[in-house]
Image: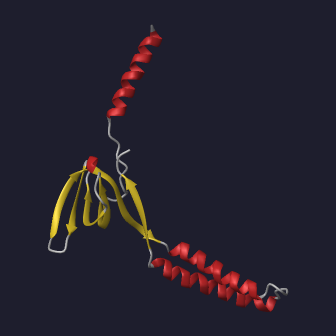
Amino acid sequence: MKTKILLISLLISGFTYSQVVKYHLPPKSHYKSAVISMYNNEPMKISNVNIKSDSISFDIYTDSDNIYSSSPLLDVDYLQVRQGNNGLNGAIVGSLIMGSILTCKYLNYSLSIGELPELLIFTIGGASIGGVIGLMIPKKKKYFITY
C-alpha cells in the first residue's frame, strides 16, 4: 500500500514538475544591444534589451525609424549577448606565435643565456600585441531561452 501511494505521488509530482516552464536567461537583465531569434524568424539585431521574469522588451532599429517591441519569453528561441572580450585569448595566441617564431630561429643550435632576454621580450611583446587585438574582439554567448 505504501509503495502504491509513493508511486502515485511520484507520478503526480513528476507531471506537475514537467508543466513548469524553465528559462535559461543571461545573468544581467539589461543589455545595450543583442541578437534575438524568435521562433520561425531570422535573427535580428536589437538594442535596449530589458529581460523580465516572463517577458522581454527591446527596440528594433530599421532604416526609417525605431520600433519598440515586447514579447513573452516563450516566443524567443535564443538571445545572443556580449559578455566581455577576447583579451586573454589574444595574449595567449600572440605569445605562442612570437615565442615559436623566435624558437625556430634558434632551433638549429643551442639557446644560450644571452638569447634568453630576447626570447622573453619577443614573447611578452607578442602577448601584449595579441592582448590589445583581443580586447577589440567581443565575446558573445547564445542563451537558448526555453528548454
* Residue shown at 45% from the left, 75% from the top: 137
In the figure, 104 relative to 25: above or below?
Answer: below
Residue closest to the eye, 102 or 50: 102
Residue 91 pos. (x, y %) = 57, 77
> Does residue 145 appear anywhere in the picture?
yes
Residue closest to the eye, 142 or 132: 142
In the figure, 79 relative to 63: above or below?
Answer: above
State which quadrant residue 22 falls in.
Answer: top left
Residue 113 pos. (x, y %) = 81, 88
Residue 145 pos. (x, y %) = 35, 50
Image quadrant in which the C terminus is located: top left
In the figure, 18 relative to 138: above or below?
Answer: above
Left or right relative to 31: residue 109: right
* Residue shown at 65% from the left, 84% from the top: 98
Residue closest to the eye, 76 or 118: 76
Residue 128 pos. (x, y %) = 56, 83
> Does residue 53 appear anywhere in the picture?
no
| Colour mapping | secondary structure
In the figure, 81 relative to 120: above or below?
Answer: above
Image quadrant in which the N terminus is located: top left
* Residue shown at 39% from the left, 19% from the top: 9
Q: How many numbered badges does the structure rendering display?
A: 0
